[in-house]
Amino acid sequence: MIPRGPVSAKGMLLSAAKSKDPVVFFEPKALYRSQMEDVPDEEYYIPIGKAEVMKEGKDVTVVGWGRQLIVLEKACEMAKRDFGISCELIDLRTLSPWDADSVETSVRKTGKLLVSHESPITCGFGAEVVASIQERCFLSLEAPIKRVCGYDMPFPLAKEKEYLPDEWKNLEAIKNLMEYSQ
């Protein structure tokens, strides 16, 4: 499980604690410093293995998890504002099991998929998402699936900004997907 902020972290941790199966919880601490969210006092649970459609859209499906959702939200907003592109933004929330059905439903609607994460492109989890959706949605795809990921090289913390995929790289990929099908 990988939260995108403090609110999702609480719901995921409560679900993990109640789970009969072992759960690995990735905790990107930068999220807690970067987002100011009021976390509800009451108990609530975020289901393990169920993605969340954060934003409905009709042109491109954009998938990510964890801290990358902050970047993807900005890219989707810029795509809408500057180019009139409507993105459906999905937070996978859990990687094993991951909610392929939700992603498939969205891709069948939009015909295009962008997967973005911070890990290197080679052997990153995005490759699993791409392979599965390619098999499930081949005849529904209107453009090749795009991945925007980190580079295949180690990097020092001082160069993190150049290494990690930002909103501009993701916006460019969204535009490329739209141009491919026009």
Image (cartoon, rainbow, N blue to C red):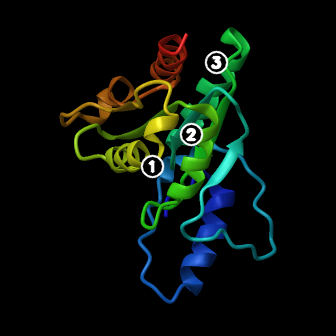
Q: Nearer the viewer, mark 2 or mark 1?
A: 1
Mark 1, residue position: 136
Q: Residue 129 placed where, x, y %? A: 40, 48
Q: Position of residue 2 (x, y in %)?
A: 50, 58
The kind of residue tagged 1 is Arg
Q: Is residue 123 left or right of residue 12?
A: left
104 relative position to 155: left or right: right
What residue is drawn where x is 81% and y is 74%?
Answer: 42
Q: Which mark is residue 79?
A: 3
Q: Position of residue 143 (x, y in %)?
A: 46, 24
Q: Earlier in the sequence, mark 2 or mark 1?
A: 2
List the residue tagged with mark 2. 107
Q: Decide if residue 144 is on the left or right side of residue 127.
A: right
Q: Could you tell me which residue is drawn at 51 percent across and 48 percent down?
A: 65
Q: Quadrant of the C terminus?
A: top right
In the structure shown, which secondary structural element does the residue marked by tag 3 occupy?
helix
Q: Is the residue 68 above or below the residue 82 in the image?
A: below
- Amino acid carrying mark 3 in the image: Ala
Q: Which label number is shown at residue 159?
A: none
Point out residue 67 in the picture as x, y percentages from the top left corner.
51, 44
Q: Residue at x 48, y 43 (%)?
A: 137
Q: Residues within 10 Å of mark 3 (few under 14, many from 20)?
A: many
Callout 2 secondary element: helix
Q: Residue at x 54, y 67 (%)?
A: 49
Q: Three-letter amino acid code at disc 2?
A: Val
Q: CA distance from mark 2 to mark 1?
A: 10 Å
Q: Nearer the viewer, mark 3 or mark 1?
A: 1
Whether 161 is drawn above or below 39: the answer is above
Instruction: Calculate the distance from the C-alpha at mark 3 to the C-alpha at mark 1.
Output: 27 Å
Q: For this rendering, which residue is in front, 171 or 132?
A: 132
Q: Quadrant of residue 81?
A: top right
